[in-house]
């Protein structure tokens, strides 16, 4: 690979601490790989994101990440309170690209690595010809999850736009075989890659099957199925506590549910999330739509067994009956899965930690970088 061209990375984040979640953690793992293993590429990398400081919007400057400086162009202002957002960040980001992306003077040699699909067209309009898209979850049916435009004609138009992105991209990175199969009907260069973690710790827990500590980490949105997790925790005498880590549009609704075992932490920085994983016994996820959640990989890296629905690519990383248990999303199903894990807890915990080793960031991100500059398909 000859990194003569710039690598331009697009995401609706500030690449440091907003918004907290698996997508940002995944991108940071890639940047850490560049900083440690490919400084020649890092020197030619530009990050195009958002800012929490209005004075920085539209100003090309730099940010420090992973022990080095990266060029950074924030194109719009983000709202800090993700539980009560008033504007679509996707729409604001698209408008910001229209206003500010021109100053980068994109050329046909630049490699554009797109983590948020609304950037795709604007990159092309500004001269970016090489456009690779990382799909953190399947774009198929994604319009149903739009918060601001659900049920409106905009949702249908956005879905058609996403199909155009799949067809027109020079290459796509996906997290699971199902999405790979769907996209491959529309594009001949779809590469299956994994999310990656940057830290592992074999936590030794003093597990008490009569006082189980549950944890959820993620966005407080309808597709996460959090009310059923709360109900299962409250109804199960074996459960001592449930920590809900995150924020989102359902924050007020979830806090209004009568519950004596639930603790809301708000959105937490990555190190604080790891602390919550050290204190917990089981990670519970209950999504109806996912790719491969970074949260699950990080939990396994902390020796935390997983109780989860079997959607998206989750079954490709969680071995049900060994590193976790699956549910159908119902309250009773969640309780039974927790019980199965509790019966042989140490085995589940140790197996989860052992399996997490294959998801460390170096090997995963080397394959991504080779594909970006080599242009080969899987």
Image: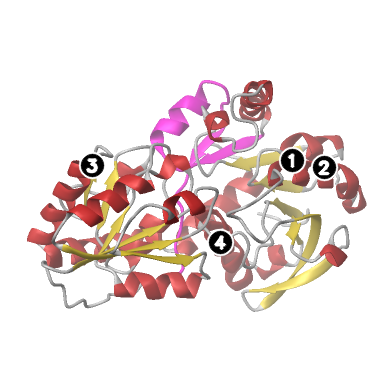
- The range drawn in magenta is 170-198
Q: Pointer 3: residues within 10 angstroms few (<14), some, or many (20+)?
A: many
Residue 357 appears in the picture as rendered:
no
The circle drawn on residue 20 is 4
Residue 89 position within the rendered picture, expressed as x and y whole percent measured from the top left: 70, 47
Evaluate if marks 3 and 1 touch, with contact meaning CB atoms under 8 Å apart.
no
Residue at disc 4, secondary structure: loop
Real-space Cα distance between discs 1 and 4? 19 Å
Real-space Cα distance between discs 1 and 2? 6 Å
Q: Pointer 2: residues within 10 angstroms few (<14), some, or many (20+)?
A: some
Residue 218 position within the rendered picture, expressed as x and y whole percent measured from the top left: 45, 55
Evaluate if marks 1 and 2 touch, with contact meaning CB atoms under 8 Å apart.
yes
Question: Residue at coordinates 81% horizontally, 59% vertically from top-left?
Answer: 73
The circle drawn on residue 91 is 1
Residue where numbered disc 2 is placed: 95
Q: Which one is in front, 148 or 75?
A: 148
First along the sequence among labels 1 and 4: 4
Real-space Cα distance between discs 3 and 1? 35 Å
Evaluate if marks 4 and 3 touch, with contact meaning CB atoms under 8 Å apart.
no
Q: Which one is in front, 87 or 255?
A: 255
Residue at disc 1, secondary structure: helix
Question: Residue at coordinates 63% horizontally, 25% vertically from top-left?
Answer: 167
Residue where numbered disc 3 is placed: 327
């Amino acid at each position: 690979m000859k990194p003569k061209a710039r690598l331009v990375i697009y995401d609706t984040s500030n690449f440091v601490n907003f918004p907290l979640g698996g997508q940002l953690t995944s991108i940071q793992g890639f940047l850490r790989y560049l900083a440690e293993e490919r400084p020649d590429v890092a020197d030619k990398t530009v990050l195009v994101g958002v800012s929490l400081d209005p004075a920085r919007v539209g100003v090309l400057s730099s940010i420090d990440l992973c022990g080095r400086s990266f060029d950074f162009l924030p194109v719009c202002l983000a709202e800090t309170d993700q539980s009560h957002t008033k504007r679509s960040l996707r729409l604001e980001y698209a408008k910001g690209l229209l206003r500010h992306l021109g100053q980068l003077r994109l050329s046909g040699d630049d490699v554009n690595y797109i983590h948020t699909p609304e950037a795709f067209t604007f990159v092309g309009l500004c001269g970016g010809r090489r456009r690779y898209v990382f799909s953190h979850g399947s774009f198929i049916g994604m319009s149903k999850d739009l918060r601001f435009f659900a049920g409106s004609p905009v949702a249908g138009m956005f879905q058609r736009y996403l199909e155009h992105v799949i067809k027109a991209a020079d290459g796509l990175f996906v997290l699971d075989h199902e999405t790979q199969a769907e996209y491959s009907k529309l594009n001949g260069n779809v590469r299956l890659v994994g999310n990656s973690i940057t830290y592992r710790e074999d936590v030794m827990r003093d597990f008490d099957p009569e006082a189980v500590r549950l944890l959820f980490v993620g966005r407080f949105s309808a597709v996460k199925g959090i009310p059923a997790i709360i109900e299962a925790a409250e109804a199960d005498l074996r459960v001592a506590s449930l920590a809900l880590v995150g924020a989102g549009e359902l924050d007020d609704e979830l806090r209004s549910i009568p519950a004596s075992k639930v603790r809301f932490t708000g959105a937490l920085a990555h190190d604080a999330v790891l602390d919550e994983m050290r204190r917990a016994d089981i990670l519970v996820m209950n999504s109806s739509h996912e790719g491969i959640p970074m949260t699950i990989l990080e939990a396994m890296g902390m020796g935390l067994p997983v109780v989860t629905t079997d959607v998206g690519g989750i079954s490709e990383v969680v071995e049900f009956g060994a590193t976790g248990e699956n549910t159908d999303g119902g309250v009773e199903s969640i309780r039974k899965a927790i019980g199965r894990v509790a019966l042989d807890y140490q085995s589940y915990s140790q197996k989860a930690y052992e399996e997490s080793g294959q998801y460390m960031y170096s090997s995963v991100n080397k394959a991504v970088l080779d594909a970006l500059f080599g242009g080969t398909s899987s």
